[in-house]
């Protein structure tokens, strides 16, 4: 009889450990637990900062939206253009893709504390129209770190703008 009682107690202890283990696994699950909550917060902050950079450069309302992490961990970011769901990232125009790529690079560098590292801008904005190129150059001037120094290309850029607008250069 004592042996049966011992087995029942061991079974109950095993069930309790199983329930505790399930709670821990659920809490740490990247789809619905603490990790998922932290991941959503991090992604939303990242997306918000990316959208700020895009908004400074791009005239049209182009925004990234966080992927739906509730259903799957696919990390397919949605793009919204003028408030409506747009094409996937791989189907955007070259200008839209370029501005998103630049925004992601700048935000990730900032998140990683790499503000004082070189930023190579190889043909960035080549696919932009003149207005977006101007916005890009204005945005580059505002990048923190060693890029903040005003350079000759900035005054050349201002001269180009003035010539296009037919105005006199600023003294």
Image: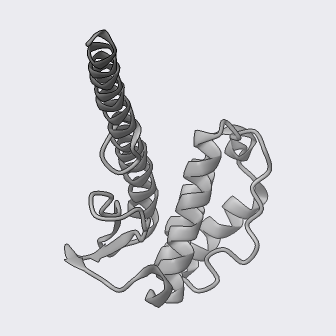
Give the residue displayed 33% in from the left and 14% down from the top.
Answer: 6
On screen, 21 above or below 135? above
Q: Taking the image as drawn, is residue 166 in sight?
A: no
Give the residue displayed 64% in from the left and 83% down from the top.
Answer: 126
Q: Position of residue 38 (x, y in %)?
A: 39, 37
The quarter holding residue 171 reads bottom right
Decide if residue 167 is on the left or right side of residue 11: right
The residue closer to the viewer here, 53 or 155, is 53
Of all residues, the one furthest to the front in this rendering is: 1
The residue closer to the viewer here, 117 or 88, is 88
The residue closer to the viewer here, 1 or 74, is 1
The quarter holding residue 62 reads bottom left
The quarter holding residue 159 reads bottom right
Q: Position of residue 103 (x, y in %)?
A: 53, 61
Give the residue displayed 77% in from the left and 62% down from the top.
Answer: 120
Give the residue displayed 44% in from the left and 86% down from the top.
Answer: 92
């Amino acid at each position: 009889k004592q042996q049966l009682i011992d087995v029942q107690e061991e079974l109950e202890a095993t069930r309790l450990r199983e329930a505790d283990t399930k709670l821990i696994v659920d809490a740490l699950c990247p789809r619905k637990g603490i990790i998922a909550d932290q991941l959503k917060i991090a992604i939303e902050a990242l997306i918000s900062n990316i959208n700020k950079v895009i908004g400074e450069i791009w005239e049209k309302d182009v925004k990234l939206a966080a992927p739906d992490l509730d259903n799957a961990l696919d990390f397919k970011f949605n793009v919204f253009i003028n408030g409506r769901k747009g094409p996937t990232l791989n189907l955007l125009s070259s200008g839209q893709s370029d501005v998103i790529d630049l925004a992601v690079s700048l935000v990730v560098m900032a998140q990683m504390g790499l503000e004082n590292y070189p930023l190579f801008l190889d043909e960035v904005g080549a696919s932009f129209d003149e207005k977006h190129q101007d916005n890009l150059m204005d945005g580059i001037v505002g990048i923190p770190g060693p890029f903040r120094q005003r350079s000759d290309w900035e005054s050349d850029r201002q001269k180009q703008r003035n010539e296009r607008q037919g105005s006199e250069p600023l003294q």
